[in-house]
Amino acid sequence: MDDLRIRAANPDDLDAVLAFWKEAAEGTSISDDPARASSGSVARDPGSPAPRELGGERVGTVVAGFDGWRCHLYRLAVHPDRRRRGIGSALLAAAEERFVELGGRRGDAMVLTRNERAHHAWRAAGYAPEPQWQRWVKPLAD
């Protein structure tokens, strides 16, 4: 994947990334206001790599946020026509490298329970579910 360009996201990418997710991140949602949620993420962690391009075409994304302690991975998505070519692995490697540079020691990934295809990809990358943990959420705004 010598021609894969991995770079940090910027606010100008948001519309294209949101459109990409509709095509490549099956059955997922980011929030009731995805543009606001995504722009907030980019503003808080501007070094977070997100868009991935191959020959000028967006082929994948990963949101890799570091809060000073935890290394969070969300939205690993590869275009359906480009899967199984090492793009997802390259995205995760770039995110993990950044985490290590920032002092991170452990990555965690948000993976939908029903997304069996994603389970295989995350396991192949060395991640495993922790059955003793369950995500609890509470909406804080309307």
Image (tube, rainbow, N blue to C red):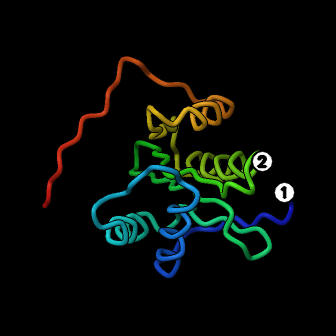
Residue at 40 percent of width and 43 percent of height: 69
**Element class at badge 2:** loop
Judged from this view, the residue extending furthest toward the bottom is 12
Q: Is residue 86 above or below residue 41?
A: above
Label drawn at residue 1: 1
Of the pair 140 and 118, the residue shown nearer to us: 118
Label drawn at residue 105: none
Specify the amino acid type for callout 1: Met
Quadrant position of residue 82: bottom right
Q: How far separated are the C-alphas under marks 1 and 2?
A: 7 Å
In the image: residue 80, left or right of residue 43 = right
Specify the amino acid type for callout 2: Gly
In the image: residue 6, left or right of residue 63 = right
For label 2, the residue is 86
Category of crowding for the residue at label 2, using alpha-carbon neighbours closer than 10 angstroms: few (below 14), some (14–19), many (at least 20): few
User: Where the C terminus falls, by quadrant?
Assistant: bottom left
Name the spot of residue 3 as percent of width and height, x first. 84, 66
**Element class at badge 1:** loop
Residue at 50 percent of width and 82 percent of height: 12
Name the spot of residue 91 as percent of width and height, x first. 66, 52
